[in-house]
Image: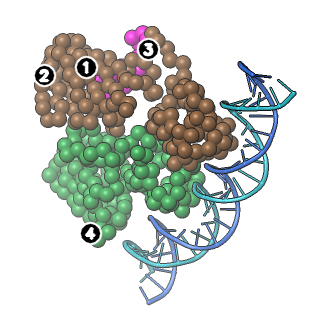
Chain colours: A green, B brown, C blue, D cyan
Amino acid sequence: MSIDVGAHLKAVRLMYGLSQRELAKRAGVTNGLISLIEQNRVSPSVSSLTKVLAGVPMTMADFFTLDLAAKRPVFFQRDELPDLGANGVQQRLVGSPLPLRSMSIWHETYAPGADSAERVVAPPGERGGVIVRGRIELNVGGETRVLGAGDAYYFRNSLPHRLRNVGREECEMVSASAPPPNP
Amino acid sequence: MSIDVGAHLKAVRLMYGLSQRELAKRAGVTNGLISLIEQNRVSPSVSSLTKVLAGVPMTMADFFTLDLAAKRPVFFQRDELPDLGANGVQQRLVGSPLPLRSMSIWHETYAPGADSAERVVAPPGERGGVIVRGRIELNVGGETRVLGAGDAYYFRNSLPHRLRNVGREECEMVSASAPPPNP
DNA sequence: CATAAGTGTTGATTATATTAAACAGCAGGA
DNA sequence: TCCTGCTGTTTAATATAATCAACACTTATG
């Protein structure tokens, strides 16, 4: 039995917080093609899928090795969590990156000086979290606060927001994001 | 810089001693298509290439990881082994760093307090090893044991697992992991 | 309410993969 | 020599992938 190329591509794309048009632009294909592939209405050529994956980026080998159909485990240990962060932000996704999850939970670690400004995963929805260790500066919709261990936040993802570790120590937090109540 | 699909297909086909027509018949495609693919005059669709490979048989994942199977050395000196470890774990891979290999063998050294860092996407398969020196705490699927020199372990890679050196001395082990046996 | 920018989807057109069938070549045998 | 059966290749017809441009929808802004 062959893998579900469409579901895989969608999962991979959402893992990286990309829209169809963003990915299409990076990959040098049209957004319509990505839509059709994700719906399994076409079977892309190897060259096309290679181009598309290069926009993520991901190799064909990794793409076909990913096993999304595997039974989802219940318990997750720290080092099994995939790190999707960048720029000094370690951003570990709790659980497998299936698109059908009702929410995403993250275990994040911000190095001193780390800044989320560039790479915020911002699909429409809401987002909240609790600071576990260290301090972090959070700006939401123009309002800025510095939060410490035990503090928390919750806001709509559509608001412009930015997380910065302005201290000298790492900041660790657990956050979650969910799509709007009625999909 | 994608892999050479045509050359790969031809190599795989000849490895199994199949003619283009034999493979085509098994795969349910025409011999002409295989000829064109092998000459890189077309870029097959994912569905077509999947069908073709099913005639070998071979999975897409294996096909696209076949890349570095070129000239593989036989002997390795200690300092040649690439260290892929982190967090106090020295994890030296025996042999070339990528498939197509039937298994991976590791020479690992856990510093006191070291904690294993599993790969993000753990391929399905099995894993085992033998402790050579020191002691290590192994947790597999919620069950924890402390293993010493001469002890060993073996488990399915899909189970959550974690290795920690909870002692005061280094722990050295040799381990191996392999994909599930082909049907 | 109107506008703009964002999302994913879709129909018609164009480009390309795939088929079906014929081709040229090579080997061994009557 | 002409078979018979195999190899891989090629051409024209057809099926399908990929594009382009528009659509409907949501969210934010004036």
Counting from the top left corner in percent of width and height, residue B119 is at: 33, 34
Amino acid type, mark 2: Val
Q: Is residue B153 magenta?
A: no
Extent of the magenta region = B76-92
* Discs 2 and 3 lie in a common subunit: yes
Q: Earlier in the sequence, mark 1 or mark 2?
A: 1
**Three-letter amino acid code at the position of disc 3:** Glu
Cα gap from disc 3 to disc 1, whole angstroms? 21 Å
Residue B127 found in image quarter: top left
Tell me which residue sits at (46%, 12%) in the image.
B74
Callouts 1 and 2 close, C-beta under 8 Å: no
Judging from the image, what secondary structure is the residue with disc 2 in?
strand
Distance from Cα at disc 1 to Cα at disc 2? 14 Å
Q: Nearer the viewer, residue A177 or A52?
A: A52
Residue B80: numbered disc: 3
- The chain under label 1 reads B
Q: Label 4 belongs to which residue?
A: A181
Mark 3 Cα-neighbour bin, 10 Å: few <14, some 14–19, many ≥20: few
The chain to which mark 2 is attached is B
Chain-order first, disc 2 or disc 3: 3
Mark 3 and mark 1 lie on one chain; the one further toward the N terminus is: 3
Q: Is residue A32 left or right of residue A81?
A: right
Viewer-nearest of labels 1 and 2? 1
Secondary element at tag 1: strand
Q: Amino acid at mark 1?
A: Gly
Percent across and percent down for residue D7 are 67, 30
Q: Identify residue for label 2.
A: B146
Is residue B40 left or right of B164 when viewed as pictured?
Answer: right
Residue A37, horizontal then vertical, whole percent: 49, 56
The residue identified by callout 1 is: B129
